[in-house]
Amino acid sequence: MGLIDTRLSYVDGLTSHVDGGYGKFRFNPDGSLSLGQAVLNYQLDFDNPLSVHINSIAYADGLQDGLGLTEANIHYQGLPSNNGQRFSARLGVMYPKISLENNATGWTSPFTLTSSTLNSWLGEEVRHAGLEVNLDLLGKFHQGDYDIGFSATVFMITMPILEFLKMVNMLGRRVFII
């Protein structure tokens, strides 16, 4: 499963500010075709409740080309018990499950071309390495229309947040992590 996002742009104006010109657009005059992003999602399912999930992303627009791994985790999802409780867990590098907007492959949104400011921040700053455990109470076992889920996460602090805390401490303010 994956996603390929290509961009075609045409600019009729000055040379881009990126190339030292006075143009206010990112690309130079005339047309260009670029790879906005390519996301590859690989999932290896075993015969038991374990699976491995890996997401990678690539950009190639001639200005900032890159390839990286965005998620890599082992996922466990057991079968529901007789009373409708299901336990699941993830271990590895992952995005938190807190976004209703960015819920597609590679933290992308199926609804818009670009993410909102909040989801962009979450995707950059809050991705973490850790263990997430979930307990779902499935409504269909109790003639309910909705499921209820409880989640807990133990994670290592992410580097961007650590850099932010160092910056705040350099400004003379004290930050305590509890």
Image (tube, grey):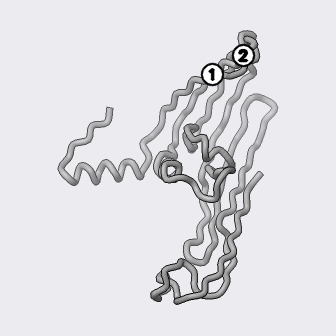
Give the quadrant of the C terminus.
top left
| Relative depth, front residue between 3 and 46 | 3
Front-most of residues 168 and 22: 22
Q: Secondary structure at mark 1?
A: strand
Judged from this view, the residue extending furthest toward the left is 172
Answer few, some or many: residues within 10 Å of disc 2's Cα (few below 14, many 20 plus, some between 14 and 19).
Answer: few
Kind of residue at disc 1: Ile
Q: Indicate the position of residue 52 as horizontal and vertical percent values.
A: 70, 41
Estimate the x, y position of residue 8 in percent, counting from the top left. 69, 75
Residue found at x 71% / y 18%: 139
Q: Quadrant of residue 90?
A: top right
> Secondary structure under badge 2?
loop
For the point 45% across and 87% down, the residue is: 22
Kind of residue at badge 2 = Gly
Q: How many marks?
A: 2
Instruction: Give residue 62's quadrant in the image.
Output: bottom right
Q: Within 10 angstroms of label 1, few (less than 14), some, or many (20 or more) residues?
A: few
> Where 51 sits versus 135, above or below?
below
Whether pointer 1 and pointer 2 mark residues with C-beta atoms closer than 8 Å, the reply is: no
Compared to residue 65, the image places residue 138 above or below, namely above
- Mark 1 = which residue? 148
Residue 143 lies left or right of residue 15; in this view the side is: right
Disc on res. 156: none
What residue did someone put label 2 on?
144
Spot the residue most to the front: 12
Is 10 on the left or on the right of 16, as rendered?
right
**Quick one: 119 or 78, which is closer to the camera?**
119
For marks 1 and 2, give the CA distance. 10 Å
Side of 148 relative to 23 (left or right): right
